[in-house]
Image (cartoon, grey):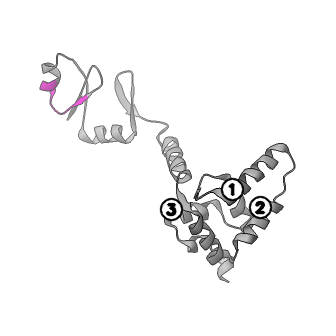
């Protein structure tokens, strides 16, 4: 059992709560406490209840984690060459030829070119990666897997293997 005091601090022994001059607020099983630590349970009206937003929160955390994955510039260019036969010069040409019809798109394109020229590492969350992937027929899921593993074969689609 886990015992929560009136400050919602957990304790293994109820005596600790009494020794500290606090009062018992809530008690739960070890399993329920683990669910609380994992975010599956949350406090509401001094009771632990199921977190209705748990799945959404986990998906958001996973998306943030994936966005922060990074690979070196060499990793990315080697993978594009191995998986798609695309050279750095061809990547630059693709970026230069991306349509930009408004000020925001022009700005995005220029920032992509700066990243292409200057970045030592490429983060998965950089829009340049999705844009380039889209032009090369690489899905977002494939890009996620590539950044997760640094395995260029994740960038090869079924059509590439034919």
Q: What residue appears at the point 56 percent right and 51 percent down from the top-left corner?
A: 67
Please report contact status of discs 2 and 1: CB closer than 8 Å, yes or no: yes
Secondary structure category for the residue under label 1? helix
Q: Earlier in the sequence, mark 1 or mark 3?
A: 1
**In terms of image quadrants, where is residue 17?**
top left
Q: What residue appears at the point 69 percent right and 63 percent down from the top-left corner?
A: 133
One can see residue 74 in this view = yes
Quarter placement of the C terminus:
bottom right
One can see residue 129 in this view = no
**In terms of image quadrants, where is residue 156?**
bottom right
x then y, percent, for residue 1: 20, 35
Secondary structure category for the residue under label 2? helix
Determine which residue is flagged by label 3.
Answer: 148
Q: Answer left or right for 150 relative to 35.
A: right
Determine which residue is flagged by label 2.
Answer: 95
Q: What residue appears at the point 72 percent right and 50 percent down from the top-left corner?
A: 111
Determine which residue is flagged by label 1.
Answer: 128
């Amino acid at each position: 059992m886990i015992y929560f005091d009136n400050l919602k601090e957990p304790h293994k022994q109820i005596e600790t709560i009494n020794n500290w001059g606090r009062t018992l607020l809530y008690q739960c099983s070890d399993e329920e406490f683990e669910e609380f630590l994992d975010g599956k349970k949350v406090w509401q009206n001094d009771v632990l209840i199921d977190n209705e937003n748990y799945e959404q929160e986990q998906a958001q955390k996973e998306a943030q984690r994936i966005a922060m994955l990074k690979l070196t510039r060499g990793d990315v260019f080697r993978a594009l060459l191995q998986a798609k036969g695309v050279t750095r010069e061809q990547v630059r040409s693709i970026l230069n030829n991306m349509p930009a019809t408004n000020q925001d798109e022009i700005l995005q394109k220029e920032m992509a070119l700066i990243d292409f020229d200057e970045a030592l590492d490429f983060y998965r969350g950089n829009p340049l990666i999705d844009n380039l992937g889209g032009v090369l027929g690489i899905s977002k899921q494939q890009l996620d897997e590539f950044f997760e593993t640094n395995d260029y074969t994740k960038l090869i689609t079924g059509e590439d293997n034919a």
